[in-house]
Image: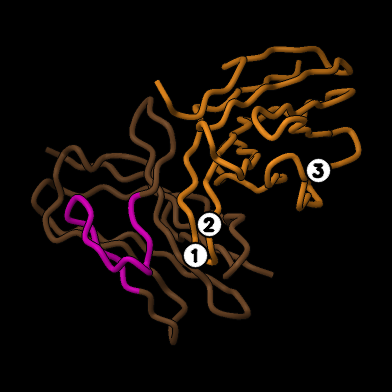
Amino acid sequence: DTGVSQDPRHKITKRGQNVTFRCDPISEHNRLYWYRQTLGQGPEFLTYFQNEAQLEKSRLLSDRFSAERPKGSFSTLEIQRTEQGDSAMYLCASSYRRGGSYNEQFFGPGTRLTVL
Amino acid sequence: AQRVTQPEKLLSVFKGAPVELKCNYSYSGSPELFWYVQYSRQRLQLLLRHISRESIKGFTADLNKGETSFHLKKPFAQEEDSAMYYCALSGVGNEKLTFGTGTRLTIIP
């Protein structure tokens, strides 16, 4: 499968613990996005990278959240001191940015986080 | 601020009947509009975008700037159309997507 992959697919943790998710984009895609989806809602933008540079962060991304894409390939999203409100599906997407036109974002299967 | 509204959370339609999923948006500027679909146990995928003006799987959507709408239509529903549909918007030159809350479409055999 050459699509976007995410690991783990499911994570259950206790409140206060730290968790880290990984996203592997489609090879050679230079843009990588993180979204969060809670029950009954559409995905909400969190942050995105062009290569290794983090270009934008949503106000949803509190200081407990940090994302990295150290070599411009895979990305990690870490949540420190998890809270029950962090329970959600975390989606990763990638695209290949060229020119000024929109480039389709390809989504991964998501990581479902449950905070007890 | 950009916002996408999908007024119907659930929509049930008989097979062979026409389908219309509503989407309204607010954006100060010229947005790009999309429909994404998520079939059962599959990942979110792009169905169509307004710029391409294509018909995908029999679905079409016309951007109406006067009414700020981008409704998704299909003349004859098929059982395989049952899925979750999300309308989404991005600003020109800014590819982050703003999604609506989605409409779950169920086609009744």
Q: Position of residue B67 (x, y in %)?
A: 43, 82
- The residue nearer to you, when weighing A114 against A77, is A77
Q: Nearer the viewer, mark 2 or mark 3?
A: 2
Image side of residue B65 versus residue A37, left or right? left
**In the image, is residue A77 above or below residue A43?**
above
Q: Colour of chain A?
A: orange
The kind of residue tagged 1 is: Ser
Q: Colour of chain B?
A: brown
Image side of residue A55 versus residue A6, left or right? right
What subunit carries mark 2? A
User: Mark 3 sits on what residue?
Assistant: A61
C-beta proximity under 8 Å, tags 2 and 1: yes
Q: Which residues are magenta?
A: B47-62
Whichever of labels 3 and 1 marks the residue nearer the N terminus, that label is 3
Q: Secondary structure at mark 2?
A: loop
Quarter where residue B38 is shown = top left
Q: Secondary structure at mark 3?
A: loop
User: Mark 2 sits on what residue?
Assistant: A98
Pointers 2 and 1 within a single chain = yes
What subunit carries mark 3? A
Q: Image point 49% across, 60% down: which residue?
A: A102
Q: Nearer the viewer, mark 3 or mark 1?
A: 1
User: Mark 1 sits on what residue?
Assistant: A101
- The residue nearer to you, when weighing A105 against B71, is A105
Question: Dot 1 surroundings within 10 Å: few (below 14), some, or many (20 or more)?
Answer: few
Q: Position of residue A16 (x, y in %)?
A: 89, 18
Question: Dot 2 surroundings within 10 Å: few (below 14), some, or many (20 or more)?
Answer: few
Taking the view exactly as shown, the residue that stands out farthest to the bottom is B66
